[in-house]
Image (cartoon, rainbow, N blue to C red):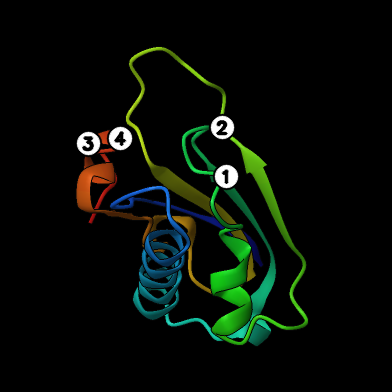
Amino acid sequence: MVRAVRGAIQVDGDDRASIIAGTTELVAEVMARNKLTTDDVISVIFTATPDLTAEFPALAARKLGFHDVPLLCASEIDVPGALPRVVRLMAHVNTDRPRQEIQHVYLRGAVALRVDIAQ
C-alpha cells in the first residue's frame, strides 16, 4: 500500500547548517519511527516557511542516501502569525502498515502545529 507520512521541525535559524541539521533530524526520525528504508520511499515533498532561504531541505535527504528518490522543495504560504523557521515534509511510502499505525513526526517547536497527531 501507498501511505503518506507527514512531519515538521522548527529549525534554529536561516543558515545552511541549521536547515540541513534540522531536516536531517526530521527525516531520520520519520524513517526510524515508521521502520522505513529508502527503498520504501516513493517521493518526498519538502516545504519551508518563507523565512528559510539559505538551503534546500532536500539536500539533507540526499546526504542520508535518498539518491534515487524524487524530492521536491517548495515554499509555504506566507500566513501572518504562522510559526517561523519550519521545514515540513510529506513522504509517500510503500508499507504494509495500516493508516492508523503511521507515525507522523513533529519535532521541536513544530509540535505546536499538530498536537493532535504529534508523537
Residue 3 seen anywhere in this rendered image of the structure:
yes
Q: Of the residues tagged 3 and 1, which is closer to the observer?
A: 1
Residue type, numbered disc 3 = Ala
Give the image location of residue 69, x and y in percent: 74, 75
Please give the label number shown on residue 112.
3
Taking the image as shown, residue 2 lies to the left or right of residue 57, namely right
Please give the label number shown on residue 70.
none
Please give the label number shown on residue 76.
2
Q: How far apart are marks 2 and 3 (CA)?
A: 17 Å
Numbered disc 3: secondary structure: helix
Residue type, numbered disc 1 = Thr
> Dots 4 and 1: beta carbons under 8 Å?
no
Give the mark, 2 or 3, whose residue is nearer the N terminus. Answer: 2
Give the mark, 2 or 4, whose residue is nearer the N terminus. Answer: 2
Q: Distance between the residues labelled 1 and 2?
A: 6 Å
Give the mark, 1 or 2, whose residue is nearer the N terminus. Answer: 1
